[in-house]
Amino acid sequence: MRNIGLIIMREFKERVYKKSFIITTLLMPLLMLALSAAPAVIMFFVRGETKAVSVIDQSGIVAPQLESGDDIQFVVIEDGDLQTELKKSLESEEFGVLFIGSDIVENPNNIQLYTNQSSSMLIEEAIAGQVEEIIEAERLKALNVGDLKRILEQVEVNINLSTFRNGAEQSEATSSAASSFVGIALGFVLYFFLVVYGSIVMQSIIEEKNSRILEVLVSTVRPFDMMMGKILGVASVALTQIAIWGVLLIVISAAVIPAVMPDDILAGVEAVRAGADAAAMVPDMDIEAIAALSSIMDTGYISQIVLLLLLFMMGGFLLYAAMYAAIGASVDQVQDAQQLTTPVMIPIIFAFIILTMVMNDPNSPLVVWCSMIPFTAPIVMMGRIPSGIPTWEVVTSLVLLYATFIVMVWLAGKIYRVGIFMHGKKPTFKELYKWIRY
């Protein structure tokens, strides 16, 4: 244990004491927020040129009602010929020509857009959306209903559904949107750490093997101790980073958000927590958004999420790091490890795919089983936890995960102790199996 402790401290200090680790740990949350907000900011500030579209409407119904905007400028052509206008649009470098047939109301498919440059889904949807509304209005007029627009406005209803989860003492407000978002985010964090830090373990072992440092170290340290020290050392780095982010998240939840929120919204949050009618207290705000804020501002909930994240992060990393360590000890170059890492990456990628299914149904049979299978459990289970699942499922998943880690370390240790002395030849899966049986 003393030797393992020395190796752990060496691996920990080598990475945590670097300026790059400190900068990455502090800036990564800000970078993730910036990346999530970047598409909306880019769409807001960066707009394309206004597209000029000539409209030939043989029906005489649609063209007068088309509305131009920042993206599209409609130019109605009276009594225009399609072929003539197509030639003119090429010479004037217009975006294109929109042709509308005379029977557009009865045959909505009798409409064509001829473009002189690459089109886009947004442009096509904007044109189709306007034409659909116009045709629907014309069809409704045929029903001879007076003042139809006012009637539709009066009967239109928007439902704000309040969702509560029954608990032991009182009903607890929930937000499915917030739970899905948090679950996807946590699953992505686990995916990122398993891939990145697992690769770090493998690359570190390959570098030390090529420099023949391992051959010197194993003269005083058992190969198994060497492998465990390296795995636990890198795991401590990953846990340190997640723990720092967790503390920052708890501080923001407990102090920063309540300090900047208006009093009426805070009152709505308290009403949601108590199971009261928050929509009546804050009528201008979506009840789903208030429920989401209630979850974010719940320090106990955030602390529980961070704790479970650390547990699944530790178990998942130890499981996959053992396999990465065995692969690193088996080869001399990173390029040679690509074939051997494929079976390791497949469960991680599969788990990330299943993670997207959690939004639809966190309790579907496939999702539940994948949250129990140790190779996919860390990512999938962290996606399910924010939705609220039985405690026994979480405990069972953790027990299976750590039990599988113990077995995997035992198998990886057998490969590791042979592989660190092998040079010049990339082993096959058959040879790895022989090493396990030695």
Image (spheres, grey):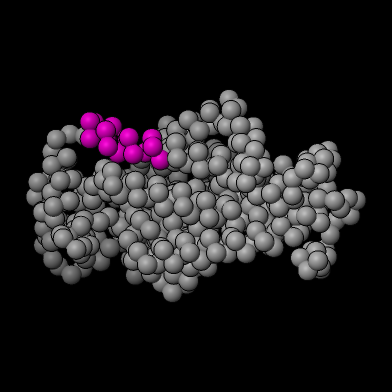
Relative height, residue 165 to residue 212 (above, below):
below
* Residue 259 counted in the magenta span: yes
**Foreground of the two, 178 or 312:** 312
- Residue 347 in view of the camera: no
User: Which segment did they paint magenta?
Assistant: 246-260
Residue sitting at x 65%, y 35%: 10
Residue sitting at x 28%, y 63%: 136
Q: Where is residue 334? Give x, y as percent.
A: 77, 47
Give left or right: position of 271 versus 3.
left
Query: Which quadrant would residue 429 be assigned to in this image?
Result: bottom right
Q: Where is residue 433? Give x, y as percent.
A: 78, 67
**Foreground of the two, 202 or 43:** 202
Give left or right: position of 325 versus 75.
right
- Residue 426 in view of the camera: yes
Residue sitting at x 15%, y 59%: 170
Give left or right: position of 54 versus 88.
left
Q: Where is residue 116? Give x, y as percent.
A: 57, 46
